[in-house]
Amino acid sequence: MLKDRTKTESPSFFSSRKSVETPAQTRASHGLEQFFASIQGEENLSILDFAGASQANISFITALGHRIYSNDVVRSLEEAFGSEGDFSAQQADPQRAAAFLEETLSFADQSFDGALVWDTLQFLAPPLLEQTVEHLFRVLRPGSFLLAFFHAEEKTTSAPLYSYRIVGPKTMSLTPRGVNRPTQYFNNRSLEKLFQKYQSVKFFLTRDHLREVIVRR
């Protein structure tokens, strides 16, 4: 049985870069709508959620008749690379990178029928980013979908990090969790290259400069 490894503390590394307290916002998401449309009519699926343990997400997924595995990947990032020194540079440390991958994606092949990755990938530097996407490919079953978000402003020096809560099949709540600098700018071409092993990549650009990406394994 898959167990929840979520840690409930807020991550000090990202919170230290949060300058203004901003309330949660609720908005529609075409990517989320596509994700849930892909599993409509299915039963007893296993869904991987990178947002950490959330009663809203757990209740919504289990009410659909599926299982959810919650993992606070932001917390894992902070623990692996945010304690001291340069956050991005420390991702090149093989031991730290291996520990992060072991903590977040040490599952058997084809364990999941979908993954809600949210905005975590944009804070991973190469080659750890490519390794993480490769591990996601490995743990997802063929034909399943992955949902990820990337900040869409090319010249930004920092991007907000959120806690994502599912409100409905096409609606989510975003609670600010801090800010950090993305490791690189992701446009459509670079994302297609990143997910080149996957069957398809589809993009939705939102009004709040968020690029929603729905990827089919």
Image (cartoon, grey):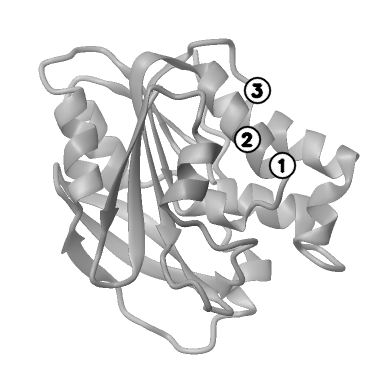
Which of the labelled discs sits on residue 132, or is there none? 2
Q: Residue at x 54, y 39 (%)?
A: 194
Q: Which of marks 3 and 1 is nearer the N terminus?
A: 3
Q: What whole-number distance in Å separates the C-alpha atoms at marks 2 and 3? A: 11 Å
Q: What residue type is labelled 1?
A: Leu
Query: Would residue 78 appear left or right of 191 to someone viewing this image?
Result: right
Residue 21 lies, in percent from the top left, at 42, 85
Assign a secondary structure to mark 3: loop
Q: What whole-number distance in Å separates the C-alpha atoms at marks 3 and 1? A: 15 Å
Instruction: State which mark lies toward you, 3 or 1.
Output: 1
Q: In terms of depth relative to the viewer, which is nearer, 181 or 113?
A: 181
Tell me whether the residue at label 2 lies in contact with that at label 1, contact meaning CB atoms closer than 8 angstroms.
yes
Q: Which residue is drawn at 52% across and 78% down?
A: 156
**Total numbered badges shown on the rendered structure:** 3
Assign a secondary structure to mark 1: helix
Query: Quick one: label 2, few (<14), some, or many (20+) residues within 10 Å?
Result: some
Q: Mark 3 points at which residue?
A: 106
Q: Mark 1 points at which residue?
A: 128
Q: What residue type is labelled 3?
A: Ser
Q: In terms of depth relative to the viewer, which is nearer, 59 or 15?
A: 15
Q: What whole-number distance in Å separates the C-alpha atoms at marks 2 and 1? A: 6 Å
Instruction: State which mark lies toward you, 2 or 3.
Output: 2
